[in-house]
Image (cartoon, rainbow, N blue to C red):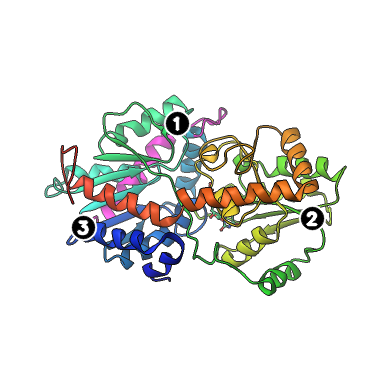
Amino acid sequence: MNSINDYAEIVGKETIDELQEIASHLEGKVIQNINSTAVGGGVAEILSRMIPLLKEVNVNVEWDFIKGGERFFEITKKIHNSLHGVSDVVITKEEFNYFDKITNDNLADMNLNGDIIFIHDPQPIGLIAAKKRPGFKEKKFIWRCHIDISSANTNTFNFLKKYIELYDASVFSSPLFSKKLKIPQMLISPSIDPLSDKNKELDETQITEVANRFNIDLDRKIITQVSRFDRLKDPLGVIDVYRLVKKYTDCQLILAGGAADDDPEGMEVYKEVLEKADGDKDIFILNLPPTSNIEINAIQRMSTVILQKSLKEGFGLTVSESLWKKKPTIASAVGGIPLQITHKYSGLLSRTIEGTALYAKQLLQNPEYANKLGLNGHEHVKNNFLITRHLRDYLLLFIKTQYNNENIIYL
Ligand code: UDP
């Protein structure tokens, strides 16, 4: 892990000094983070970098997981999809009851010892029931939502709302995701860690080694999407885009993905992708283990153009990862992606397969323009979506929970 001072090179020493000063106001408090998986997907990615960094600024932080099992995670994936507004998801009363049963099992098993209990996403949301335990009155509970719930299914949202409104505060990634709630709502965007294995600079030999390992030809153009094998990331649509582009320009396609412990649909979607690729030797479908950070970094860096063709998206960390690497990026205008890409300035926003293909062709044929988008994208991520900004926001949020109704807090 990096020292907090290593980040001074990127964001300046004053920023680091300020972080340390702010963090000192949390002395004596335990911050307990709880989610449902240590690996796979953006939430685990952020926590795996944020927890060590909080420790670096001497915050007493813990990271725990709820236990689920196959049926529970099938239900929570349905909840996830229907919060994103996928219309054909039906969650039965029995399934909601089963969700509550697993919550009760976790409530019985877990030691909720934090002074501030920071719950991530819907899977562990019901742990808020602990708030009414004797001696828990002083503890603060915060719910952090990483999903775009702006078009959530009403039934599903109402089921969660009865939990959400028991929290002391909620956090969303974009102002567009906020809902009418009786509790305070904070806006905190996610972030990437520029010094992690996933994002740090790599030398050419490392990139070549990864390309050789997967038989990818670095002398030919490469279009890439990095994402869990999930229908909402539209990997099949990405193959359609590639086939349209290939009519005009030679290129290879990399679909790099992997599984998440709390996503049971991955294998099924992976098989659909393999079938659609139909043995095309220029399509590389890489089902990578969760430790593949250097591989993903190298794949992003070897790409000519990066796509994020999501149908729904929370924030889309992969977009920031791509922009940070100065890559021309074409992504769907959904969820938090427009926070990261200003159309025709820091990347391109699209809505359809045809539109994405047209832009991809344009970028492959016009490297100068592509380059400029990548450079602007890098600056935008540097100014807005690095982990140091995120750390500052979280520290201030934790401090805020320690004051009840003050509008201004003097540190
Ligand atoms: N990721 C990974 N391996 C994979 C696919 C994705 O490490 O095979 C990472 C990706 O680099 C990013 C995170 O998982 O850091 C995905 O976050 P994002 O917000 O893009 O999507 P989510 O999976 O949370 O919907």
| Secondary structure of residue under mark 3 | helix
Q: Are marks 3 and 2 in contact (CB under 8 Å)?
A: no
The image's mark for residue 26 is: 3
User: Dot 2, how many residues are within 10 Å of its Cα: few (below 14), some (14-19), or many (20+)?
Assistant: some
Residue 88 located within the stretch drawn in magenta: yes
| Secondary structure of residue under mark 1 | helix
Which residue is at a point 82% across and 63% down the rendered structure image?
219
| Secondary structure of residue under mark 2 | loop
Please give left or right for residue 69 compared with residue 130 in the image.
right
Which of marks 2 and 3 precedes in the sequence?
3
Alpha-carbon span between mark 3 and mark 2: 50 Å
Alpha-carbon span between mark 1 and mark 2: 36 Å
Please give left or right for residue 306 compared with residue 19 in the image.
right
Question: Does label 1 point to a residue whose CB lies under 8 Å from ligand 1?
Answer: no
Q: Which residue was labeled with disc 2?
A: 221
Q: Amino acid at mark 3?
A: Leu
Which residue is at a point 76% across and 39% down the rendered structure image?
357
In-front residue for pair 367/136: 367
- Return the x and y of residue 241 as percentages of the image width and height: 76, 41
User: Dot 3, how many residues are within 10 Å of its Cα: few (below 14), some (14-19), or many (20+)?
Assistant: some
In-front residue for pair 70/180: 180
Q: Amino acid at mark 1?
A: Leu
Which of marks 2 and 1 precedes in the sequence?
1
The image's mark for residue 379 is: none
Q: Which residues are magenta?
A: 84-112
- Return the x and y of residue 234 as percentages of the image width and height: 66, 41
The image's mark for residue 176 is: 1
Which residue is at a point 71% across and 40% down the rendered structure image?
237
